[in-house]
Image: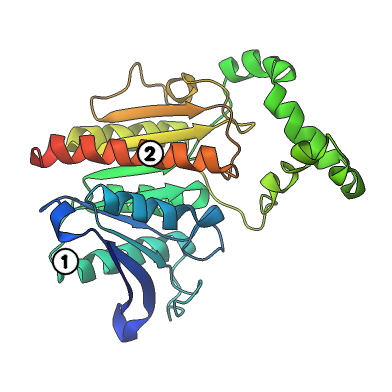
Amino acid sequence: MTEHALSFAAGGRLTGILTEPDTDRCRPGAPLVLSSNVGINHHVGPYRFFVDLSRALARRGFASLRFDLSGLGNSGARKDTLGDLQRAVDDHVEAMNFLATRGYRRFVPVGFCSSVDAAHGIALRDERVVGVCFIEGYTFRTRGFFLRYPLRLFDRARWRRVLSRKMPPILRDLPGLRRLGRFATAFAGQDQVFLREYPEPADLRRDYEALIARGTHQLFIYTGDDNYNHQGQFLEFTGLTSLGPTMKIVHLPEADHTLFRVADRDHAIALVCDWMEVTAVASYGPR
């Protein structure tokens, strides 16, 4: 594979890393994967998630661009009065326009937590988006969520995480507790630093149905965070009676919100890569 640092958009304002597969692995006409900042972090993603994802995709024959939005990481600020979401969506449009000059015509944005906002927005706005992946995306607590909520008291992984946060640092190096203590940093960076405006469930349902009607593939990955506790919760809060033919939901109850553990990140990356192969074959025929 090859990786290139690029500057694009007006005045080279936006910067990112384009990862492309070796020629013998390349999938002509396959969509390119886009990823951008999670919160105010730079484009590598939580625990370098997007770096690992880009390289795993390249081994499967897919190209990807991970880039910084305006005013974040290595990208310059925009000189306008648009809101954060509109700027992020416009940055994605500029990224796709630039990539079109390099021969890429179809795209799959991957959103993670707060970057789901931009992935959702660009998927609705631009028909060049043929698939979209939402990792820890929009969710709402439902009646079923609260009925299942007491079951968390019997979740061993949850208790390990809770105890590790409460444990004094000096105890984490004691024999027998080191392994438990390693979970403490799994919650680093989860404090609220800015507010986001969630779409209403009825609006989400309309948006997802519009993407289904357009034939846009959608992958949703949820972890064992306190806001999502059952595979079927997605149908509960959207009001959909069933998943559309281009939708897939995966629940990873053992994983934490930022995919801190290497095994959880590897699992999520494999899910995205497998889904990309199905999406590419469904949309453009076999390799």
Residue lying farthest to the bottom in this orientation? 11
- Identify the residue at horizontal 28%, vertical 31% (top origin): 209
Residue 66, image x, y percentages: 38, 62
Residue lying farthest to the left in this orientation? 285
**Is 75 left, or right, of 216 in this rendering?**
right
Residue bearing mark 1 = 100
> Callout 2: few (<14), some (14-19), or many (20+) C-alpha neighbours within 10 Å?
some
Distance between the Cα atoms at labels 2 and 1? 27 Å
> Of the numbered discs in the image, which one, if any, rests on residue 10?
none
Sequence-first disc among 2 and 1: 1
Residue bearing mark 2 = 270
Quadrant assignment, res 268: top left
- Identify the residue at horizontal 85%, vertical 44% (top origin): 172
Q: How many marks?
A: 2
Q: Please report contact status of discs 2 and 1: CB closer than 8 Å, yes or no.
A: no
**Is 204 left, or right, of 211 in this rendering?**
right
- Identify the residue at horizontal 32%, vertical 22% (top origin): 243
Type of the residue with mark 2: Ala
| Front one among 23 and 185 | 23
| Front one among 218 and 274 | 274
Q: Can residue 199 be seen in this view?
A: no
Residue 3, image x, y percentages: 32, 68
Q: Quadrant of the C terminus?
A: top left
State the SS at label 2. Answer: helix
| Front one among 45 and 205 | 45
